[in-house]
Image (cartoon, rainbow, N blue to C red):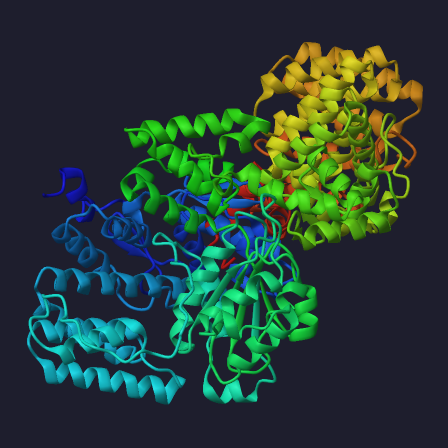
Amino acid sequence: MGATAGEGAVFREDAGEPDLQVRLLGPVTLSVCGAVVPAGPRLQRSLLAVLAINAGLALSRSVLVDFLWGEQPPSTVSHSLHTLVWSLRRLLGSERLERVGDGYRLSLGVGECDVLRVRQLAGYVQRRDTPAEEALAGAEAALSFWTGSPLSDVEGVAADLVRAELESLRTQLVAARVELLIELSRAVEALSSLRSEAANDPLNERFSELLIIALHQLGRRPEALAEFDRVRHALREELGLDPGPGLRTAHEKVLRGGDPERPPDRVDKPVPVPKPAQLPATSRDFIGRHGETAQLVGWLNQDQDAAKAQAGPRVVVLHGPGGIGKTSLGLRAAHLVAAGYPDGQLYASLRGFDPAHPALVAADVLPGFLRGLGVLDEDMPLGAADQSAMLRTVIAERRMLLFLDDAPSGQVVQDLLPGTAGCAVLVTSRQRMAGLVAREGARRLDVRPMADAECVQLMSHLLGAELVAGQPEQVGQLIELCSRWPLALRIAAEQVLEHDDGTLGLDEVCGQLSRAGDRLLDRLGTAEEDPAMMMGQVLSWSYQRLSAADQRAAALYRLLGAGPTVHFDQHSAARLLDCPPDQAHLLLRALAARHMLEPDGVQHRMHDLVRQHARAQADLQDSPAALGAAVDRVLAWYAAASSAGRVALGTPLKVGMAAPGQSAEQLGLEDADAATAWFSRSLDDLMACIQVAADRGHPAAWQIPLGLIGYLELANLGETRAHEISHRTGAAAAAKAGEHLAEAALLTNLSVLYERLDDPQEGLSVARRADAAAARAGFAPLRVVTMLNLGESLVDVGQHDEALAVFDESLALATELGDDALRSSSYVGLFRAHWGTGQVELADRDLEQAFEVAERAGVGGYYAAFEAASYAAESAARTLMGVDPARAGEYARRALDRFGDALMPYDRACLLSWLAQAEQATGDRASALQHARAAVAAFESLESFETKQYQSARALLTAQQDPR
């Protein structure tokens, strides 16, 4: 039966090429409207490659830094990364490359990137219902995209891993093409490809096996036998291995002769020495994990010399949480290396985390192992110690692989270990098995959630490549909801497939899981209700073992789930449990050892599904009052830490903020760099705390946003969404609690944000609310600030007469307070309002007054002198640039010369840009270039790429063809 039109079309090129094409299966190249354009220097090509391979998925900053620079990023890594992103946006368009969280996402259609197209074709080829002719055409179309080694001009360890994955994909496609040719009785066409592949990879048993089958199909028996002899000799010489079962089966068919299409005749064989093959079948739809698989195979592969040099067996531990895919990965690697253990494989599930059955110990497993090795029941010792000794004796001269699945502890594994070299033991467990590492020199592999690209591949295989390619947003949402855990993804895919229409099924399942909230785990179960296929049950097995072993750790687990954040350190965990930080540190390590938490830099994090399980256990076992008290304690901690961070950034505390306490010392917030790093990694958690605090009526709802102000101002427009949401939520909570000082401060800062976003009407609306809140609070210095802000907003929308009245009032109140910085800012406001009404002489007088008062202002007022001066200089530059650029530049230079590095970084960058524009306008091009370069560097260090002054300075450099 032929393919449908849609299926057949999947491997045909569109009539016209897309306007944008990214090619990675060779050198990294970029084409726009059919013309090749330079993809930029090496790091820029690398960034394009990693974003394109993961198109549609958000890559975090840490992932990008690892890919580009590996383990030794430069000290200027933030600046360098954002410069690369800015350059790529110029090539691709800013709408394609968007910021998501602390990372970036590149939007590409399947036809716009060769790797995406090849993956789509590979999924189609691998589908079981694809007709052979169509699958063959798809494989050939996919292979045609390769023009050389993938990413051939990209360097680095991470690039090497991606390259290996893509080469592996090519190998799979070549093998699939050859298999299809043989299936279609076109072995002649397969021969040239097979000979080439076998010559390039002489130890690849699969290609040699297919070559033997093809030669046999063509009746070329001597050549088939010669190929077997060649690969057998190569395997023995290079690896010390015998041919695997696939090669041996193909060889036996050739030896028997006859029609290769007929089943082989039965032949008598001698009774072999028992050679157990107890490994369960590997999953047919095992996807991804190429790097982990390669590492395991490398650890498990044996050669004779290495085996003799060892004092004992090789021990490899796969550890990770339940449902993460340890067993599937272990079986995949075990089958790949099984040929290297010609005396057989033993397997046992030790049921370490199955509450329906007790965990097995050595005495439960040893009899089965011994029977598999040919020991009769009447010859078997009675005691476990004697059985263990017999096991070591029986396999002493053998090369065997033991797979111990779901081990409860290192001691159980210890009792089952062989005593001599030549064997290997592969262990999976939810424990980290530190004892095995110390005693046996075991190697450990931490199995983590799958990469986004691998999740997409898995869903393409489970649901079909066409459905996944046609619904990228829904698939991405499903991956996020399932926390990239293979078991959760398989359960969700099964639920989708329960619908006759896959597209409707995908939409419905995404909607159900999104709406499930805290009951998401209840939705992630199969219709058959197999406990092993229910995410909640799998996680409960781990929790029950924990609860039996360590009640205190179990209590912390529950509270971490009930708390507002997904990241934890010993200080926040200590507040939740109300215990000393040192004790919290030990408990966090205990949870991490059981994979109920994962290390994340200097913190720990809890995966979303684990967190939901922990929250459910908290609701079952802890009282609402106890949970509420724990949450309040950690909210107060984050409020104090935010205040400490604000102080470290050089921004003084204001009325209504939390006292920092010991948080600065505990977190190491010694300077601005440390505070910036803490705010950056904690921002998501702080935002979560603000919302929870607002819901609970806790002061942290406005205290944390007040603490964030300094960091958000440094970030300028780099954290616009966090800025807006935190301030709106905090101001609303403060107003509800009658904390009008905090309300006014947050609304004032929010109105400034809207000014920078070029939304003057919203800025004016918020400024009026801020001034009203300050009036209710009755705090005169803050009232002057809100009036200044209101006046500025009125000027921005052209309401100059009302602005003059507001500035006159602010000047009178600032004079009454004796605050020169506020007086200076009031004069600036009057300057702008008088200029707007055409009263130039009054405006000039106001501006000069503003500078004179600012330059003699002290440090004890609401604003510092440098803040007043930079405000005056930028207002002057903005107003005068179009009519008197020399004078605009004079004021900018005056503030820079007087206060220099004391200025806020963003303000200094703006003044440098204004000065460069003024110098360009007055013909001083050398100075203009110098100051434009300084402005661009300052803005890029702040990630302020969207501001007008950055764009103006950058445009000035471009116009002068500056190499920067």
Residue 66 x %, y %: 55, 59
Q: In the image, is 119 to the left or to the right of 652?
A: left
Residue drawn at point x = 75 percent, y = 21 percent: 696
Front residue of 283/717: it is: 283
Front residue of 797/209: it is: 209
Q: Up-down: is 571 above or below 300?
A: above
Front residue of 67/721: it is: 67
Residue 801 x %, y %: 68, 10
Does any portion of residue 791 appear in the rendered image? yes
Does any portion of residue 15 appear in the rendered image? no
Residue drawn at point x = 39 percent, y = 62 percent: 165
* Farthest front residue in view: 378
Give the position of the N terminus as an image quadrant: top left
Front residue of 70/408: it is: 408
Q: Up-down: is 936 above or below 420?
A: above
Residue drawn at point x = 13 percent, y = 64 percent: 182
Residue 632 x %, y %: 81, 29
Q: How many labels does the image show?
A: 0
Residue 834 x %, y %: 69, 18
Q: In the image, is 468 to the left or to the right of 588?
A: left
Residue drawn at point x = 39 percent, y = 26 percent: 508
Q: In the image, is 241 to the left or to the right of 800?
A: left
Q: Up-down: is 611 above or below 221?
A: above
Q: Using the rendered view, name the quadrant where residue 837 is placed.
A: top right
